[in-house]
Image (cartoon, rainbow, N blue to C red):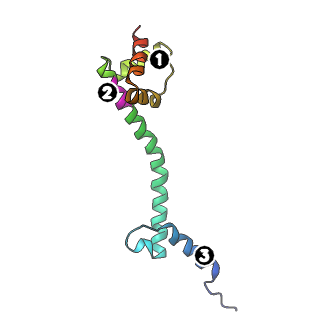
Amino acid sequence: MVRIKGGKISQKRRRHILENVRGFRWGRKSKVRLAKDALFHAGEYAFRDRRTKKRNFRRLWQIKIGAEARRLGLSYSQLVNRLKGKNIILDRKTLAQLAEKHPPIFQAVVEKTKG
């Protein structure tokens, strides 16, 4: 039987793995078996945290809106309820940007909900 050596394809696969683990620490940057395991876990964390990131931003927006609403005499929940009652459709990202960068416009939006 012909002997099959670990040729070009295997080396290419290993090189590809090791290129993707640049910056990892200890043996995970240079040993193929450890590098494969590290990449697998990194992929899992990346998948999970792409969803966590959305959650965290929504929480941040709620905090910014709530802080500005309190300054104007409302709680976050009261403001959101009034916005829905008046049929003012603004998402939380936009409201947070208004609260942070354009307080007079945010105040006008809040006044619309009161009147």
Which SS class for mark 1? helix
Q: Is residue 33 left or right of residue 74?
A: right
* Residue plotted at (45% across, 76% down): 31
- Residue 67: which numbered mark, if any? 2
Q: Quadrant of residue 13?
A: bottom right
Of residue 19 and residue 99, the one placed in the foreground of this image is: 99
- Measure the C-alpha gap from mark 1 to mark 2: 19 Å
- Residue 12: which numbered mark, if any? 3
Amino acid on which disc 2 is placed: Ala
Write the start and end of the magenta stretch as one range: 62-68
Q: Quadrant of the N terminus?
A: bottom right
Amino acid on which disc 3 is placed: Lys
- Measure the C-alpha gap from mark 2 to mark 3: 54 Å
The x and y percentages for residue 95 are 43, 26
Q: Is residue 88 magenta?
A: no
Which SS class for mark 2? helix
Q: Quadrant of the C terminus?
A: top left
Q: Which residue is mark 1?
A: 84
